[in-house]
Image (spheres, grey):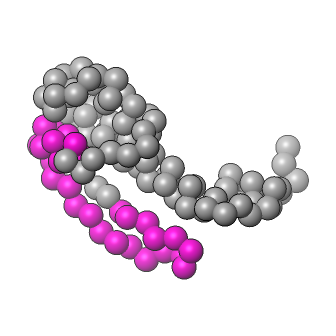
Amino acid sequence: MSDIKGTDAAEYIRIKFGDYPDFEKGIEEERMKCKIGQMIYDARTEANLSQETLAEMVRVEPDMIARLEEADFEEIPFSLLQKIAKALSKRIEMHFVPCNIKTVELQLSL
């Protein structure tokens, strides 16, 4: 059991191993990818569509939808997000929201 109580994983790593350049940026990027993946999954399952069906609708391979939902991607073209949203009868809204001084998070919703 950890001797550092009440910390999240990123804070635990910082305490245990110190700060590394771009560490916080990498954590925020991974969080955003996870949020995007979860939103795609939630909207797809709400529409009762399989990954294969959604992939056909947006003209990508099914493994692309799987990778997006699993946050296993480096970049995602905004045009692909738009196609996915349209196929799911959704629209994309983006908001900049306040956060700590070190990071800026783009809040996305489908």
Q: Is residue 14 visible?
A: yes
Residue 49 location, x and y as percent? 21, 26
Residue 52 position (above or below residue 88): above
- Direction from residue 92 to residue 104 in the image, left or right: right
Q: What is the quadrant of residue 89 in the picture?
A: top left
- Direction from residue 100 to residue 42 in the image, left or right: left
In the depicted view, which residue is nearer to us: 57 or 21?
Answer: 21
Residue 106 location, x and y as percent? 37, 64
Which residue is found at the position 33% from the left and 36% from the top?
41
- Direction from residue 47 to residue 74 in the image, left or right: right
Count of numbered circles on the image:
0
Which residue is found at the position 22% from the left and 28% from the top?
60
Q: Is residue 50 visible?
A: no
Residue 89 position (above or below residue 20): above
Q: Which segment did they paint magenta?
A: 80-107
- Direction from residue 78 to residue 69 in the image, left or right: right
Residue 35 location, x and y as percent? 41, 49
In the depicted view, which residue is nearer to us: 20 or 47?
Answer: 20
Residue extending furthest toward the right? 3
Which residue is found at the position 32% from the left and 45% from the top?
76
Q: What is the quadrant of residue 100 in the picture?
A: bottom right
Which residue is found at the position 27% from the left and 32% from the top?
45
Residue 34 location, x and y as percent? 45, 45
Question: Which image quarter holds the N terminus?
Answer: top right
Q: What is the quadrant of residue 109 in the picture?
A: bottom left
